[in-house]
């Protein structure tokens, strides 16, 4: 599946949604990513309608998307405007022209990844076959998105180490100290100013010196 060939997290999420549009009987699709535990943020959408409905749920801390994420269970809503469990969401969905919804959680082992949301402008749009395909897609998407996130984190970690190394080199040259002392200076400045070590290193690289504490 081409999901696993995407370069980064944004490309992977976009690939998931494009595949969903082709494989499932849906009008729109969206993917919300799990962040900071069981909270969610909009990852990607195929239509502004989806972003509005996702953001509505995130702002209200209520709705089927968040319920699917928290409980890690799929939620199928055949008639969105008539849904009684989330009346405010149902009204918003109806106003946006959404007829039916299928939310499928994404997870790898115990790691929450997000929720794949499929939307149709027609009620009762999703068949049992559509649900089966959505679950298969969700399993592939979970692995692909988790892998892309891990690679992105590794890349950021490597970049941070390089940046810290550059900052240490500047301090070693400017203050005639060894590498251990240069790192200790960066770490102490980070603690005293409550600034991330990477950000301190960036300041040193930009200013070619350790900024004064204000």
Image (tube, grey):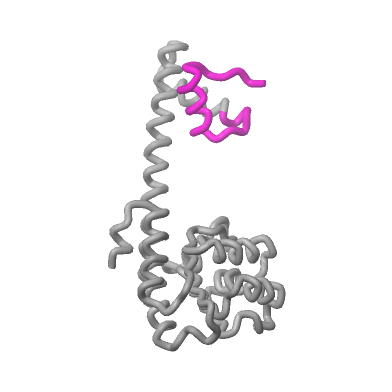
Q: State whether the magenta stretch is mostly helix, strand or loop.
A: helix
Quarter placement of the N terminus: bottom left
Q: Residues in magenta?
A: 190-214
Q: Quadrant of the C terminus?
A: top right
Q: Residue lying furthest right in this view?
A: 88
Q: Per the image, is 19 magenta?
A: no
Q: Is residue 81 left or right of residue 15?
A: right
Nearer to me, 187 or 55: 55
Q: How many marks?
A: 0
* Residue in front for this viewpoint, 55 or 159: 55
Q: Position of residue 141 (x, y in %)?
A: 39, 67
Q: Up-down: is 119 above or below 11?
A: below
**74 or 166, which lies in front?**
74
Residue drawn at (30%, 61%) of the image: 4
Q: Foreground residue, 177 or 7?
A: 7
Q: Is residue 32 above or below residue 175?
A: below
Residue at (66% x, 71% y) in the render: 92
Horizontal and vertical percent for residue 121?
53, 77
Name the residue: 54% across, 59% down. Answer: 42
Give the image quarter of residue 66. Answer: bottom right
Q: Position of residue 134 (x, y in %)?
A: 42, 77
Q: Is residue 135 visible?
A: no
- Does the magenta portion include 197? yes
Residue at 38% x, 46% y: name it. Answer: 154
Q: Is residue 107 visible?
A: yes
């Amino acid at each position: 599946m081409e999901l696993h060939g995407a370069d980064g997290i944004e490309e992977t999420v976009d690939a998931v949604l494009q595949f969903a549009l082709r494989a499932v009987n849906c009008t729109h699709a969206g993917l919300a990513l799990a962040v900071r535990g069981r909270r969610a943020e909009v990852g990607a959408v195929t239509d502004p309608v989806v972003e509005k409905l996702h953001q509505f749920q995130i702002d209200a801390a209520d709705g089927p998307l968040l319920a699917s994420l928290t409980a890690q269970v799929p939620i199928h809503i055949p008639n969105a405007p008539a849904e009684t469990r989330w009346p405010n969401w149902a009204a918003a969905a109806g106003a946006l022209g959404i007829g039916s919804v299928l939310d499928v959680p994404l997870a790898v082992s115990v790691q929450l990844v997000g929720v794949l949301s499929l939307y149709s402008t027609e009620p009762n749009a999703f068949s049992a076959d559509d649900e089966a395909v959505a679950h298969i897609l969700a399993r592939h998407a979970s692995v692909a998105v988790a892998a892309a996130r891990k690679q992105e984190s590794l890349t950021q970690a490597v970049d941070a180490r390089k940046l810290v190394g550059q900052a240490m080199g500047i301090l070693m040259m400017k203050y005639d100290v060894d590498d251990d002392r240069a790192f200790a200076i960066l770490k102490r400045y980070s603690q005293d100013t409550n600034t991330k070590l990477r950000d301190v290193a960036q300041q040193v690289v930009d200013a070619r010196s350790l900024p004064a504490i204000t």
